[in-house]
């Protein structure tokens, strides 16, 4: 957030938002993000943006594989400077009432990298962190950040 001098953020999949209302995590960033979570009534409307940055932590593994392209498009179409994705790569402890695991799309980082490269409507400086059974980190479209950074020096 600081590296990109972001002044507007979207937390895509914020849950109830307790990280902001109770724990005040946004104060460290200096920016209160717009909040979106389709499963939480008070955050169920997806803000249009654009936002300097969009981040999504512990979300994409809960999305059915067939809906990942649409979700990637939603996230990236709202981001101007960066996207940060943190994705779990192991089954969840939680089991849904249907008997299915709450993490319905458990894939290694290569899968997520391909999804971003294939379905993003426009390239945006992107960090992908996976954790769980496969801990990895990838930075995509870094040249866009470097171009932006150099333009700030002039």
Image (tube, grey):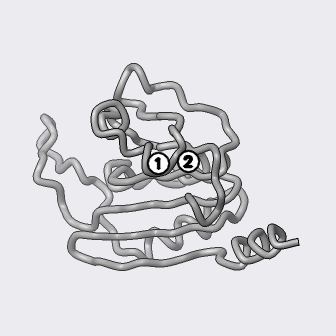
- How far apart marks 2 and 1 lie (CA) works out to 6 Å
The residue identified by callout 1 is 67
Check the image and report above or below for 50 versus 72.
Answer: above
Task: Give the camera-side residue of 136 and 27.
Answer: 27
Q: Please give the name of the residue rendered at 21% of the width and 66% of the height, measured from the top-left corner.
A: 90
Image spot of residue 36 (x, y percent)? 47, 34
Seen as rendered, the residue at the extreme top is 41
Few, some or many C-alpha atoms within 10 Å of disc 2 (few <14, some 14-19, many ≥20)? Answer: few
Q: Which sits in the foreground, 65 or 3?
A: 3
Which residue position holds label 2?
A: 70
Judged left or right of residue 42, residue 90 is: left
Q: Quadrant of residue 152?
A: bottom right
Q: Is residue 26 left or right of residue 143?
A: left
Q: Are marks 2 and 1 in contact (CB under 8 Å)?
A: yes
Place of residue 142 in the rendered image (x, y in percent of width and height, measured from the top left) = 65, 77
User: Which of the 4 image quarters holds residue 17?
Assistant: top left
Quadrant (top left, top right, bottom left, bottom right) of the C terminus:
bottom right
């Amino acid at each position: 957030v600081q590296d990109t001098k972001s002044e507007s953020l979207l937390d895509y999949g914020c849950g109830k938002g307790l990280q902001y209302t109770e724990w005040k995590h946004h104060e460290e960033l200096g920016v209160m993000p717009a909040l979106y979570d389709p499963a939480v009534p008070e955050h169920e409307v997806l803000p249009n943006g654009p936002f300097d940055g969009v981040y999504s932590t512990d979300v994409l593994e809960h999305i059915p594989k067939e809906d990942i392209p649409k979700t990637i498009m939603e996230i990236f179409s709202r981001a101007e400077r960066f996207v940060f994705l943190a994705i779990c790569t192991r089954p969840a402890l939680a089991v849904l009432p249907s008997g299915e695991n709450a993490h319905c799309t458990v894939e290694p980082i290569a899968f997520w990298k391909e999804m971003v490269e294939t379905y993003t409507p426009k390239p945006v400086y992107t960090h992908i962190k996976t954790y769980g059974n496969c801990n990895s980190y990838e930075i995509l479209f870094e040249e866009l950040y470097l171009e932006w950074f150099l333009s700030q020096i002039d």
